[in-house]
Amino acid sequence: MKISPVKGTRDFYPPQMAVRNFIADGWKAASRRSGFEEFDGPIFEYLQMYQIKSGNEIVEQLFHLTDRGGRDLAIRPEITPTLARMVNQQINALPRPIKWFSIPRLCRAERPQKGRLREFFQWNIDIIGEESVLADAEVIFCSLDYLRSTGLLPKDVVAKISSRKLLAALLKNLGLAEDILPVLYPILDKKAKIPVEAFTEMLGKVITDSGIISTILKLMDLHNADEIAGLINLNDQAKAALAHLQDLFKTLGAMGVSEYCRFDMSIVRGLAYYTGMVFEVHDAVGDLRAVCGGGRYDNLLKDFGGPAMTAVGMGMGDCVLEILLRERGILKDDTLATKTLDYFIAVADATLADKAVVLAAGIRQAGFSCEFPYKVSALGKQLKQASAYKARKTIILGQEYTIANQLVVKDMAEGLQTAVDAAGFLATLTRI
Amino acid sequence: MKISPVKGTRDFYPPQMAVRNFIADGWKAASRRSGFEEFDGPIFEYLQMYQIKSGNEIVEQLFHLTDRGGRDLAIRPEITPTLARMVNQQINALPRPIKWFSIPRLCRAERPQKGRLREFFQWNIDIIGEESVLADAEVIFCSLDYLRSTGLLPKDVVAKISSRKLLAALLKNLGLAEDILPVLYPILDKKAKIPVEAFTEMLGKVITDSGIISTILKLMDLHNADEIAGLINLNDQAKAALAHLQDLFKTLGAMGVSEYCRFDMSIVRGLAYYTGMVFEVHDAVGDLRAVCGGGRYDNLLKDFGGPAMTAVGMGMGDCVLEILLRERGILKDDTLATKTLDYFIAVADATLADKAVVLAAGIRQAGFSCEFPYKVSALGKQLKQASAYKARKTIILGQEYTIANQLVVKDMAEGLQTAVDAAGFLATLTRI
């Protein structure tokens, strides 16, 4: 009987697990540096929960099932609905602002391709209950603080930032009706992903006036917010949204991440639920999917049966990030150890094998990692084993023990050997 | 629209997440102390994979689904089948013994009750390719090393150890046929869980000879391996299995965990797939389900299409463990911080609010955690906030800054305040 893994999923052998931990540990550290607290929800939720935020079309992107009690459930494709549900449940008990992070395992029934798998991990940070520009800035800063901590530079990644509020004001100023905006956003979001002809054609299906289309095309190419006024007269709403965006860039400057940030009106985000700042981080070359994306969403908690409450957040998946870290040489196959030992015990005299068991247990109980050979082989082979296990020190049990009750402790990096008294050894252990 | 979580699942708000991390961090540390490497597999696998090990009856305990491609999948109820699949896939590349651990999220469609949920986490350790008693001892030792590290003492938990090989030899010696043993094991496994009358009745359905039943009842109550010979003549197989078990107890003694270990013939484990040592750790009072259980299984890899390869392993779920840790006072609701900050910045003069943003970003970039107020409130309120966040130090931005460019740094534990030069502050930061 031969069994294979399901397509689009990953097996994490120890080397791959080390990479996953490297990424997740970095995410956790960056979250904690910025004061986010960790949360998580169940791996499955009621199917209808995902339909609230994303409509019926989400269902075919879900792994969904009916349980024995006839309940329609789905493996979570994202954590934000769970976040909204959980915050609503304890809305009166939670001190605000709520600053939470999570690293959920998520599943989507999509066709696997580069940077997109059916099962992946996604770092999420969200600030709920704080409407000031500081919260927008914190979310972008924390994302960039993580990327910077891995060694990625402004020449490697760029945070493209825009505002749904500004975009909405501008589009309405062009004469477009409020109700076509939700139809327009997913199209505008495709700007950077498809040829300009295809993009123009898609716009043409929603907008008949070619002058408006032409202005939108110019808007989408803007990287300097000051130039907007040259294209469209700014109404008060647009002016306010623009001032807010400029305030955001000023704050990001104060936070020392200006070099990573750029205004880009073509960042729209497909989902209807964003209401303010939107951003994506891309590799500077631009040949990968977005490394992360997010923005402000002010209606979600209410849509989930809670009070109206402003929120801003970000999600970063592990698949594109890992590709990028490898392309930039930050992650290499041999960079990460799958095992490091404080001590390896080599047995030079087979009659001392029992002593190795006693010693190893004592070292572990003292809080250190230790291994000993299950079968006593030649000393050279055991020392090779110790190196393979990346042992910091190897303890050799041999004639020094038999004659003088001494352990020979070899520092594997320096190669130095010292003999120490076996009886008092465990008591001398301190963090190495 | 009001949405609730699915029954039998858990929401991990930051306080619950801190407990989950406390448990998982302990598991990881114990695994690494004993030289295990971490692995993981996908959250779902082909449904038939679970039928190989556990038959068709497992299907109704699974959350299973059919994907858009018509594949029958199941959310994993355990990780051992994934382990067998993964090891088989790379059997020739993996150095042996393979010592792996994992902390998978698992789901079972069972009725939720005390210590048993539909979604849980389970620590798994396995040693593959090593048949010596040392591997059996390592698995039991590592489980106990973790439990001991939490503060649980021999008066709190006991590892009950037996041998399937010994049991099989004894039962055959009583005249029972080999082929009824797989039927008998799940019944014998119920011994400690049901009244003796019910147990005897269940035995009676498989065994007609009341003398044999009586001997089995006595066997099940044995806690001293030396007394077996008084009940049954030991054949060579039984003698060999008994000697192996006594060797195991000797090794556990050498490892310093004798006080936690006890021979107990009533430990059988329900699953057919165990072939040698079997063990469970129970709370000493005995009113909870098993804290963990495991044993040697020599046929699983072969059943999964690989070579014949000996293996021994253990699984420990988080639900019963958490109940036990709480009952023993090791886990208290207020023991674990959901957030600790290296620095909190308090703004005594609202005109300095911008400086707090710059300073916080600099502190974070230096690798420390830091928060600042989004809205400037009274200083006393901010200091209370700093205490709530468990900040180690609070930096006060006030007139000292305006007048002398100095930061007032308050050590929150000692209450001491010192003024430091703001210009050079970031350069002075070292791990606190």
Image (spheres, coloured by chain):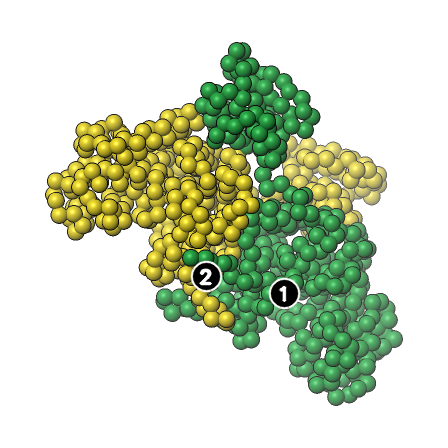
Chain colours: A green, B yellow
Residue B349 in view: no
Residue A80 falls in image quadrant: bottom right
Judged left or right of residue A81, residue B244 is left
Q: Position of residue A217 (x, y in %)?
A: 80, 77
Q: Which residue is mark 1?
A: A113
Between residue B325 and residue A210, name the one nearer to us: A210
Of all residues, the one furthest to the top in this rendering is: A403
Question: Which chain is mark 1 on?
Answer: A
Between residue B294 and residue B326, name the one nearer to us: B294
> What number is the disc on residue A419?
none
Q: Is residue A420 above or below residue B373?
A: above
Q: Position of residue A104 (x, y in %)?
A: 56, 56
Q: Which residue is mark 2?
A: B46
Q: Position of residue B269 (x, y in %)?
A: 32, 45
Q: Is residue A402 above or below residue A20?
A: above
Count of numbered badges drawn on the protein:
2
Of all residues, the one furthest to the bottom in this rendering is: A208
Q: Residue at x 82, y 70 (%)?
A: A222
Q: Residue at x 57, y 25 (%)?
A: A379
